[in-house]
Image (spheres, rainbow, N blue to C red):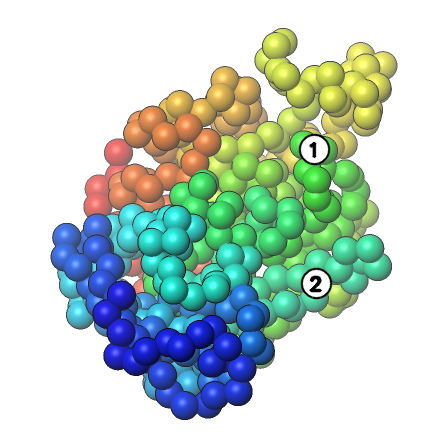
Amino acid sequence: MKAIFALVSFGWLAATSVALAASEPWPSLVTSNTLEITILAPAQSPANALLPVIIYLENLAAPRIGTESDSAIIQDFRAAGYLVATLDYAHHPRACAPFLNRDLGKLRDDLRAKKLLAAFSTDPAHIFIIPSGCRLQRDILYYADTNRPLSLDIIYPSQPKAPAGALLEFSCDNVNRQGNTSLSICSDTILDAAATEGFAVAMADHPVAPPYKGLDAMPDCAWRIKAAVRTLRAEGSKLGLSGKIAAIGFSRGSGMALMLVTTEGRTEFEGHGQNPGVSSAVQGAVVMSGRFTYLDLLPDDHMIPRYEKVWGARTNHLEIWRQHGALDYLTNATVPLFLTINCSEAPDALHQMTVLRQRLAELSSDDIFMLDREPRGHKVTLDPQILDAMNAYLHQLLQPTSVGRVAPRAPRLQPK
């Protein structure tokens, strides 16, 4: 690491408020060049504590929606105890979604592999990638369970040019909602990239406590996820957001995203958690690989014995099996959905996506489906064409054209 200052030991963080900085090179996939990452120490931090990290992306190709200055935002991050690493893209034309996702994934991969910020004791549960002009609000309670209170984090444009729509994802990490290991392994760059597109993005605790065993308790899960939507909408009204929300889900979070759509208007799932009286409606959903119904499983599905142990034999307890499937609440055409899955996913997951698409077709419900043809297994897509179509879908849903508002952007690439 090329250092502008010398670190004597990690104990120097205990009481210093001096502006200390360092830099290290980082090879970008987007630019095909090595970029310099400038590292700014927190103003104060307890000795020997793991450092929360903010990777702050400057001078992207995408329009900057937040109007507050970088210097003011970064100063506040450092005052709050974050190690801030700024990455300047110098307005490279490909420093935007859908191309940028590969770099965002690489940043998380390199942090996990200790190839980036290796000289620092960083906290893998609190690593945030934030575009220029955006702020972070953490640990917002959305469900006050006495055993495991549920919270969410919001990255949002500060003093935005126009009210921004928001994306809400339920983490596929039941221990740490922002767990960098999970995000890296799953190549989940959806929220990180969406923030560069001008959206507010929120990662919420998964409603099921660890250890996750593939069982999403109902009606508890529906109560919790609707409270998360209400809380994001309520908090967003204070942050300059538009109130429009789309749900995002991958793996164990995918059923949660779908459930928000399929249980819309069902009063039995309302009235629990924070912000009662606020709408829990979502305007759309991106649904990726997951389980959506337990009434149509492959005969050799390895989870069937686990379900039978908890719920009883399906033939004798059909209603119990039915009430746990997000898809089985869907009886009418719903808001348009964006669906995608990898071609090399497990047969069970591919079958579930097929069943979901068939049900939507039967109800004449609009959806966009794109198959990721790069064999990568159980991972979030990094295909630029799929991501581009997804971004266009989200802009169309969440940022309608009107005076003083950001127009929905056209796809940067032609989808497959």
Residue at 54 percent across and 53 percent down: it is 179
What residue is rendered at 40% in x and 23% in y? 344
Numbered label attached to residue 399: none
Q: Position of residue 293 (x, y in %)?
A: 65, 27
Percent x, y of residue 278:
69, 66
Q: Is residue 404 above or below residue 323?
A: below
Of tags 2 and 1, which is closer to the observer? 1
The secondary element bearing badge 1 is classed as loop
3D distance between C-alphas at marks 2 and 1: 23 Å
- Comparing 319 with 54, the one in front is 54
Residue 187, image x, y percentages = 41, 43
Q: What quarter of the picture does the C terminus occupy?
A: top left
Quarter of the figure with residue 137:
bottom right
Q: Answer with left or right where residue 138 lies relative to residue 10.
A: right
Q: Is residue 96 visible?
A: yes
Dot 2 falls on a residue whose secondary structure is strand
**Which amino acid is tagged 2?**
Tyr
Numbered label attached to residue 213: 1
Amino acid marked by disc 1:
Lys
Q: Residue at x 43, y 36 (%)?
A: 379
In the picture as drawn, the residue positioned furthest to the top comes out as: 299
Closer to us: 169 or 163: 169
Up the image or down, 215 lies above or below 181; here it is: above
Is residue 236 visible to us here?
no
Q: Residue 362 falls in which quadrant of the image? A: top right
- Check the image and name the residue furthest to the front: 8
Q: Is residue 97 left or right of residue 355?
A: left
Rendered position, 158 above or below 325: below
Residue under numbered circle 2 = 142
Residue nearer the viewer, 327 or 8: 8
Quadrant of the rendering where the N terminus is positioned: bottom left
